[in-house]
Amino acid sequence: MATATTIPIKPGRLFIGGKWADAASGKTFSTINPATGEALTTLAEADERDADAAVAAARKAFESGPWPEMSASDRGRLLWRIGDLIDKYNEEVGTLETLDNGKPIFESRQVDMPMVAEVFRYYAGWATKIHGETAPVKGPYLNYTLREPIGVVAAIVPWNFPLLLASWKVAPALAAGNTVVLKPAPWTSLTALRLAEICQEAGLPEGVLNVVTGSTRELGRALVRHAGVDKIAFTGSTATGQEIMRESAATVKRVTLELGGKSANIVFADADLDAAVRGATIGIFYGKGEVCAAGSRLLVEKKIKDEFMQKLVERAKKMHPGDPLDPKTRFGALVSSEQMNKVLGYIEKGKAEGAQLVAGGERAHLGNGKGLFLQPTVFDGVSNEMTIAREEIFGPVLAVIEFTDVEEALRAANNNPYGLAAAVWTRDVAKAHRVARRLQAGTVWINTYNNYDPAAAFGGYKMSGYGRELSMHALEHYTELKSVWVNLS
Ligand code: NAD
């Protein structure tokens, strides 16, 4: 690797009740740089006992101390400060994210971290705007509502946008006055721990944010089963989301689930083809394809298919994996060998089921040869029934499906268990909006792909989950609504 970093990486400890601690077991596990295969540092291996301690600290901070007494505007000020500190430490936090995840430093520093800061500032503004209403009830009564925080929120996040997805949960939870136990994914815990330090520096009272790390699924399970946790805010795979639904039933927890996707990116013959080609490549290769909303099913109208594929394949072949720390790199390393093997397995499955491999499909070797690099991969001649068109690969593998008219495109797009996102490329404005209405997806992009903003709601239809993140709508999932009656007679 050409570039190196001098960012210090400390061994990770648990952040509970405003204090740093080793795991109760004393055990640790390693976190690896996927671009080099080298260990970055060790992290505390939390178990059920540490989950208990973190939940107890969050409960205490929710019920007593400065947090429940704090005015909404002071909470807002704190969140704003956290956002500003994320900006201040952009280089350091962005570098940690890239080292841990393998994503290009361009993405970490210029896309993820600025949005993390914006998410905190966006919800800083909401802190003073969360309020109840009066209802026009019959009789000599006054009825009003109170929007109250739910209590202790367990935020469980995956490894693809580690700090960004944590911010989507932590910021609205805190804006509404909850306390949080954050559990990052085992492979990418470093920025969650750095967030804890930043919150401390911003002046967040102890116990309001707690961070626990662990290498097994048991830690997440302990939080989901814990009677002291009031709400689970989860982003991850659909299989884990289903388990969380089952496990949380015993305590009737509030649950929101942001799950997998297999998003359809539809290119009509009347589209600006060059723009659509760019959109298709960004849609699948941004974030190495480890993006829940990746446009992994590309539906192309038959009339322009040959011309489109020629441009697309040319573009895909020009994209080469590079050192994630190099600012010019746009395509980094996959997150783990487990994920690499899963993606390679799908590539073999695509070939075996008769899809035509037209770009990539192989590992790429660079640097010390131990990095987890894969060539951007494109399959043509895919049918919507093939495994690579039905299942979420979560890697840089594009399945191209041909269609002849709008109805066929819509049938194929909606014929999938997931419903996270979709996109439409056409110059016909009316057609674009008609198709957008009929797509079963929580987000639809028209002549663009992969836009996100704290003000825009994000979430899934069907097996992509329920609840919405970002926007004012997320706040509904972090508050309880109390109805109060007053006898006026
Ligand atoms: P995962 O479900 O394996 O793990 C996600 C998180 O849950 C991790 O922190 C993990 O340790 C924890 N976990 C695992 N088992 C658990 C259990 N039984 N109980 C509680 N917690 C448990 O997912 P992943 O591989 O880390 O992430 C990839 C998945 O996340 C993909 O399916 C992707 O589509 C999805 N994702 C969705 C969105 C969205 O907004 N819809 C965003 C990003 C990623």
Image (cartoon, grey):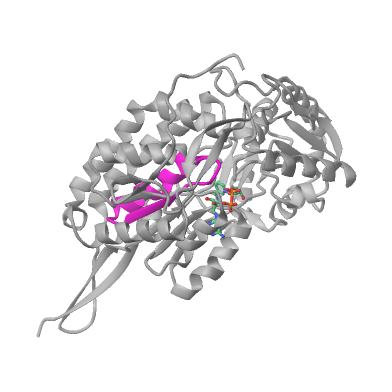
User: Left of 381 or right of it: where is 295?
Assistant: left
For the N terminus, give its image quadrant: top right
Region rendered in magenta? 161-188
* Position of residue 334 measured from the top left corner of the image (x, y, whole percent): 65, 34
171 inside magenta stretch:
yes
Furthest residue to the left? 489
Q: Is residue 321 above or below residue 119?
A: above
* Position of residue 152 measured from the top left corner of the image (x, y, whole percent): 34, 60
User: Left of 55 or right of it: where is 338?
Assistant: right
User: Left of 415 or right of it: where is 67?
Assistant: left
Residue found at x 58% / y 47%? 433
Q: Is residue 215 above or below residue 118?
A: below
Rendered image quadrant of residue 62: bottom left
* Position of residue 295 measured from the top left corner of the image (x, y, whole percent): 66, 41
In the depicted view, which residue is nearer to us: 417 or 91? 91
Rendered image quadrant of residue 397: top right
Residue 455 in view:
no
Rendered image quadrant of residue 378: top right
User: Left of 380 or right of it: where is 5?
Assistant: left
In the depicted view, which residue is nearer to us: 409 or 285? 285
Residue found at x 44% / y 73%? 251
Residue 25 in view:
yes
Furthest residue to the top? 2
283 inside magenta stretch:
no
* Position of residue 131 measured from the top left corner of the image (x, y, whole percent): 24, 59
For the C terminus, give its image quadrant: bottom left
Residue found at x 70% / y 34%? 270
Q: Is residue 340 above or below residue 245?
A: above
Residue found at x 30% / y 57%? 57
> Could you tell me how many numbered marks the image carries?
0
Q: Is residue 139 above or below residue 392?
A: below
